[in-house]
Amino acid sequence: MGTLTAQMASDGGQWRLYVVLYGESEWPTVRWESGPVPTGAQRREALASLGYEVAPGAAWSWVEDSKQPCDDSTAVVLIAAVDVREQEGATA
């Protein structure tokens, strides 16, 4: 079983966590209304609800971007990523 990438992003509004599935038109997604960054436990629960788990030894990494690329005077977009794998016995 290989690994995939899960990403989480927000531009100050709602948070969205999704598993990147290349070649697919729809990706498994969980959304949180605006608020603080979802906790590690909330992210684990969200991934589990989609049939995935953080890969052993993987850790979330964070990057900061601008809402308008190359214009750092626009709103900040936070993007996090982590390697995930399908949960054993999952039917995602």
Image (spheres, rainbow, N blue to C red):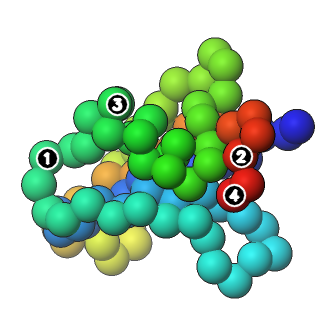
Q: Secondary structure at mark 4?
A: loop
Amino acid tagged 1: Pro
Amino acid tagged 2: Ala
The residue where tag 4 is placed is: 92
Q: Are marks 1 and 2 in contact (CB under 8 Å)?
A: no
Which callout, 1 or 4, points to the residue nearer the camera?
Answer: 4
Q: Is residue 35 left or right of residue 25?
A: left
Distance from the alpha carbon under mark 2 to that under mark 3: 21 Å
Q: Are marks 2 and 3 in contact (CB under 8 Å)?
A: no
Distance from the alpha carbon under mark 4 to that under mark 2: 6 Å
Residue at image location 32% in from the left, 39% down from the top: 42
Q: Residue 44 sits in which quadrant?
A: top left
In terms of sequence position, does the residue under pointer 4 or pointer 3 come before the other? Answer: 3
Distance from the alpha carbon under mark 1 to that under mark 4: 27 Å
Q: Position of residue 20 (x, y in %)?
A: 65, 60
Q: Are marks 1 and 4 in contact (CB under 8 Å)?
A: no
Where does the N terminus fall, quadrant-wise?
top right
Q: Position of residue 32 (x, y in %)?
A: 26, 60
Residue at image location 40% in from the left, 72% down from the top: 69
Distance from the alpha carbon under mark 1 to that under mark 2: 29 Å
The residue where tag 3 is placed is: 40
What is the crowding at mark 3: few (fewer than 14 residues within 10 Å), some, or many (at least 20)?
Answer: few
In the displayed orientation, state which residue is furthest to the right.
Answer: 1
Distance from the alpha carbon under mark 4 to that under mark 3: 21 Å
Numbered badge on residue 36: 1
Residue at image location 34% in from the left, 31% down from the top: 41
Q: Position of residue 87 (x, y in %)?
A: 69, 38
Amino acid tagged 4: Ala
